[in-house]
Amino acid sequence: MCGEQSDRKKMASEILSPAEMSEADRFSIAAGPHSGYQLMCYAGHAVAAAILERFSDASEAHVLCGPGNNGGDGYVVARLLQQSGMQIAVYADTGPAAGTDAALAKADLDFGVEPLEKFAPSLDSLVVDALFGAGLSKEIGGAAADAIGKSQRSGSRVIAIDLPSGISGDCGSVCGIAFEAVLTVTFFRKKPGHLLYPGRAHCGELIVADIGIPANVLDHIKPQTRENTPEGWAGFLKQPDADNHKYRRGHIGVFSGGPTSTGAARLAAIAGLRVGAGAATILSPPSALQVNAMHLTSVMLHRIESVDDFRETFLERCSAYIIGPGFGVGDILRAFVSCLLEPGGGPDQMVFGAVLDADAITAFQSDPESLFIRTRRSPANLVLTPHSGEFTRLFPDLSDNRKLSKVDKARAAAERSGAVVVFKGPDTVIAAPDGRAAINTNGTSWLATAGSGDTLAGLCGGLLAQGLPAYEVACCAVWIHAECAHRFGPGLIAEDLADLVPGVLADLLEEQLSYPAIQAPLV
């Protein structure tokens, strides 16, 4: 997994596509004072310094150079490593075009370049991958593919410049074959391919080097994709005012399944309370009242027999609802979802919020558009939380489109549905209908446990109930969810997660002054 900077307050969270990174280079060179060749030299210095710091035991390195700027970075690295006393061999299949910055870098070498087919690494040698970087858009073949295969069979340590060759910088997919690096050094900002799987697993440790590109180039590019870090949403979090009462802090209603499927709703309700909602009520069918009552203390219980009963007795009581966990798929679920998405509001003029999870997604598999007609028109602050299977059920055409990255798919799903989409997985993507998207990077395999998703739905619902906007709610909930799992570690079960939320929340509130102040919209 790509490494993460330890100081998240200093982390640059913008993510640039390869095309946007090219724009950043162009703006930077046009503005000066650094030329393109100077930026290339700074990039090579950053890579060489990282190699010398981390691999002081290495006496030789093989540098594989492609025809473009990535290869030019490699020529600079080769020259600097040789000057440090390391034995260097450089290989290239095609040289750089005359007059380019890469041609200048090659001209600075005072030793020859061998054909790529002669590359023969050993276990003890370093391999510097400067073949293609993040701009690759087609499958690797020929001598380049053979070189990657030789590297993998030798077991040599690979240092990738920008991105391991064979990984798409846009979507993280493997273009036929790809290097598996122990270290990747990229420049200015991360690319989607660094954070989306399987690319993320090929990166090894990830360093983002400053090579002199000014941050103000982002004002021209206006990137809409970010790494999900607290700086993007922590300013929305706040401690309750001294004069607050429980319902002003938000009231969540969680729909329960039948008598053998009640646990998911309780997990969601407890998580919603732990993340700051003032009250939670389980909305239970009559058959499950006794089961729920036996397990509830701080969570309230309300009997709901039908959609009409719910509309008449409870709909206006809560500022957010969670529906789907453990409910069961059928006409009654679709009817409740339709009722929730009707015009309406919560107490104290809060924006009404709803989380559609699990069965509430699957229930519309046969006719997704019937759901989207409602979600697009609903005044509610909506969050959909599909895992990959549920995403396929609602958005089969997007799921099957191999030309789209996970970010592209989530963004298109959010636009189509009019809701914030949390596309779950080891590289969870959160996307808003307005085009904003975030890739979560603090996930952990310990979250792969039954009930984990129910807890995430509860975190989303608990934050929505407090009147916070849906996109920031989803980003915050996903990050807190993963941070709790990290703190617990091995042996985690879903029941453990909610108990860890207060500690994570307390740390975020304590650090809040370090993040930009964000004014929540008046609701």
Image (cartoon, grey):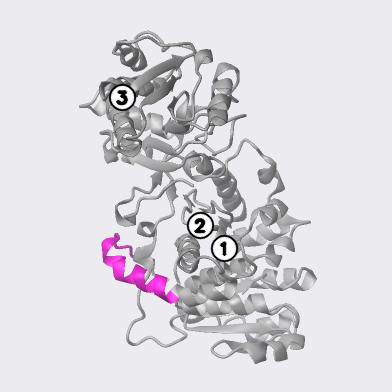
Q: Secondary structure at mark 3?
A: helix
| Image coords of residue 231 (percent x, y) | 35, 58
Is residue 8 found inside the magenta-colored segment of the image? no
Asked whether 497 or 48 is in front, the reply is 48
Q: Residue at x 54, y 79 (%)?
A: 270
Q: Quadrant of residue 286?
A: bottom right
Could you tell me residue 329's position as x and y percent? 77, 68
Determine the residue positioned at 31% across, 55% down: 7
Task: Give the CA separation, mark 1 to mark 3.
Answer: 42 Å
Q: Residue at x 43, y 50 (%)?
A: 227
Q: Mark 3 — residue?
A: 81
Mark 1 Cα shell of 10 Å, populated few (<14), some (14-19), many (≥20): many
Q: Nearer the viewer, residue 474 or 487?
A: 487
- In this orientation, does residue 31 appear? yes
Q: Are marks 2 and 3 in contact (CB under 8 Å)?
A: no
* Residue located beneath label 2 in the image: 443
Q: Which residues are the magenta region? A: 502-520
- Residue wearing tag 1: 447
Residue 518 is a magenta residue: yes
Q: Quadrant of residue 400?
A: top right
Q: In the rendering, at what x and y percent does residue 250 appear?
A: 48, 79
- Toward the viewer: 410 or 129? 129
